[in-house]
Each structure stands twice: as structure tokens, then as C-alpha cells.
Image (cartoon, rainbow, N blue to C red):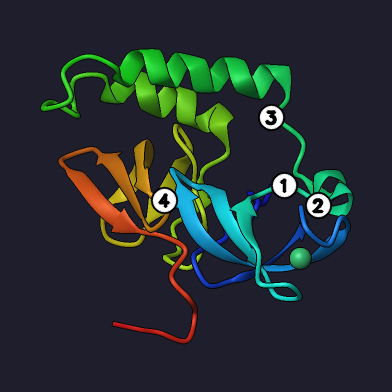
Amino acid sequence: MRLWKTKSVGEEIDSICTRCKEETIHRVVAMVESRVHLVICTRCGGQHRYRPSLSSMRKKTPLPSERQARVLKKIAAAQAPEPQEPRKDWQKLTELAAEAQPLPYDQSESYRENQAVTHPSFGLGFVRRVINDAKIEVIFKHQVKILVMNRPKSRRE
Ligand SMILES: [Zn+2]
């Protein structure tokens, strides 16, 4: 299962333009959390809130299945207290992870809360929090790490 690609500031996106009164290509001006908030129309230069085009709404990734949603909810509940002690609920988390289909961690990918990931150095982890469009807080067996996401593939550290 692939998650939807999160846009970032400066990227092009289809939106309904309030001035052109039709779907035109826009550029992302501002993000709120991981959602596109403000866009600028590349045709008329008008800046306005993002209005998803009909086609982008159709392309939207479906929500997780009910079963998947229940698993994610359980993980969230297990993680909620004691953020300083990731190991406390580790056993419970790893049991749930088997059902949560962990994704390999890749800094160019996009993750959401409660997603299970596998990291080459830290092992199995869970996205505890999406900090912003580029950073996630991941709980691993021995530590909590801030990891990057949505990094363009061409830029390497
Ligand atoms: Zn326009």
C-alpha cells in the first residue's frame, strides 16, 4: 500500500481558480500541517485558498479499511501515555505491527501518524507524530527519533 504523496511549497498542483473560474495549474504557497493551504494561479497570478480540483479528488487515496483503522487506533492508544518510555508498550506495539503492514523507511516518502515503518538502523518503528510536511517523530524500541520525509530524491545528505 502506498500513501498519497504530500505536496510541498513551490510544487505545482491543480486547483479550481476563483478568478479564472476553472481548473488551472497553481503553485503551492503555504502548507498547514501536511495539507495544501494557499495556492497561486499560474495563469492569472491570483492567490487564494486551495480548492481541490475534481480530478484530484477522484485520485485521492481511499481511507484505510475499517480493520486497518481499528489497528491504527489501538496503536495510538497504546502509544499515548509515557512518551519518554518507548519500550513500555513495545511488546504490544510489535504485536499490532504485524497487522499494520510496516513500510520500509525512505526519506523521500510520505508517512502519516501511526504508520509502522522499518528503519535500516533502528528497526521497527511507529510514526507517533507528524511534526510538519518534512518531519516525523518515530518511536523505536530504544529511542524516539525525528526523521525526515518528503525529501526530493535528488538531494542526498
Ligand atoms: Zn486564475
Q: Please, what secondary structure does the residue beneath circle 3 have?
A: loop
Label 1 – label 3 distance at C-alpha: 23 Å
Kindly identify which residue carries mark 2: 56
> Which of the two marks, 2 or 3, is nearer to us in this view?
2
Q: Is mark 1 within 8 Å of ligand 1?
A: no
Give the image quadrant in which the ligand numbered 1 is located.
bottom right
Label 2 – label 3 distance at C-alpha: 18 Å
The type of residue carrying mark 1 is: Arg
Kindly identify which residue carries mark 4: 118
Task: Tell which circle, 3 or 4, labels the residue nearer the N-terminal end.
Answer: 3
Q: Is mark 2 within 8 Å of ligand 1?
A: no
Kindly identify which residue carries mark 1: 51
Label 2 – label 4 distance at C-alpha: 30 Å
Please tell me which residue lies in front, 15 or 63.
15
> Which of the two marks, 3 or 4, is nearer to us in this view?
3
- 88 vs 136, left or right, is left
> Which of the two marks, 1 or 3, is nearer to us in this view?
1
From this view, report whether residue 125 is shown above or below residue 59: above
> Which of the two marks, 1 or 4, is nearer to us in this view?
1
Label 3 – label 4 distance at C-alpha: 20 Å
Task: Tell which circle, 1 or 4, labels the residue nearer the N-terminal end.
Answer: 1
Q: Which mark is residue 64?
A: 3
Residue 77 appears in which quarter of the rendering?
top left
Q: Position of residue 33 (x, y in %)?
A: 43, 43
- 13 vs 83, left or right, is right
Q: Residues within 10 Å of mark 1 (few under 14, many from 20)?
A: some
The type of residue carrying mark 3 is: Pro
Q: Position of residue 101 (x, y in %)?
A: 58, 38
Q: Please, what secondary structure does the residue beneath circle 4 have?
A: strand
